Amino acid sequence: MSKSTREAIVDKLRACQTDEQLLAYDAQFNIESNTGPLYLVICEFLHNRTISRAIAAKWLKTLLEDRENKLRMVSVKA
């Protein structure tokens, strides 16, 4: 992934002011991107020290909580 692509992704993530905005960007990113799911990109950024641990934790917590909620809804319906 090029430096400009990484910077653009980080800029878009930082522009998300609410959980809903982050989740909307996650859905869009996962449809449009060939680099894999957004959570893996965030982990890569964290590993490469592109972003701080605190901001990565915030984003990953939001994504994981949303995934857990979706899994709960599916298991309740089953």
Image (cartoon, grey):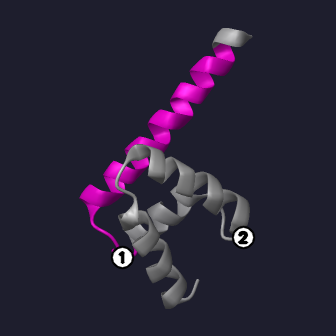
Which type of secondary structure does the marked residue at label 2 adopt? loop
Neighbour class for label 2 at 10 Å: few (<14), some, many (≥20)?
A: few
In this rendering, position of residue 31 left or right of residue 40: right
Where 66 sits versus 33, above or below? Answer: above
Q: Which residue is more in the foreground, 39 or 33? A: 33
Name the residue carrying label 1.
Answer: 50
In this rendering, position of residue 49 left or right of residue 70: left
Residue 7 coordinates in the image, percent (x, y): 44, 82
In this rendering, position of residue 52 left or right of residue 30: left
Where 74 sits versus 46, above or below? Answer: above
Q: Which residues are magenta?
A: 48-75
Name the residue carrying label 2.
Answer: 34
Residue 30 coordinates in the image, percent (x, y): 66, 58
- Name the residue at 33% across, 74% down: 49
Q: Which residue is more in the foreground, 17 or 71? A: 17
For the residues labelled 2 and 1, say whether their Cβ atoms are less than 8 Å apart: no
Residue 63 coordinates in the image, percent (x, y): 48, 44
* Residue 55 colored in magenta in the image: yes
Neighbour class for label 1 at 10 Å: few (<14), some, many (≥20)?
A: some
In this rendering, position of residue 38 left or right of residue 42: right
- Name the residue at 51% across, 35% down: 66
* Residue 23 colored in magenta in the image: no
Where 37 sits versus 46, above or below? Answer: above
Quadrant in the picture for the C terminus: top right
Could you tell me how far apart the alpha carbons at marks 2 and 1 are, in whole angstroms? 20 Å
User: Principal SS element in the magenta part?
Assistant: helix
Where 57 sits versus 8, above or below? Answer: above
- Name the residue at 56% across, 59% down: 38
Tell me the kind of residue under disc 1.
Thr
Which type of secondary structure does the marked residue at label 1 adopt? loop
Q: Earlier in the sequence, mark 2 or mark 1?
A: 2
Tell me the kind of residue under disc 2.
Asn
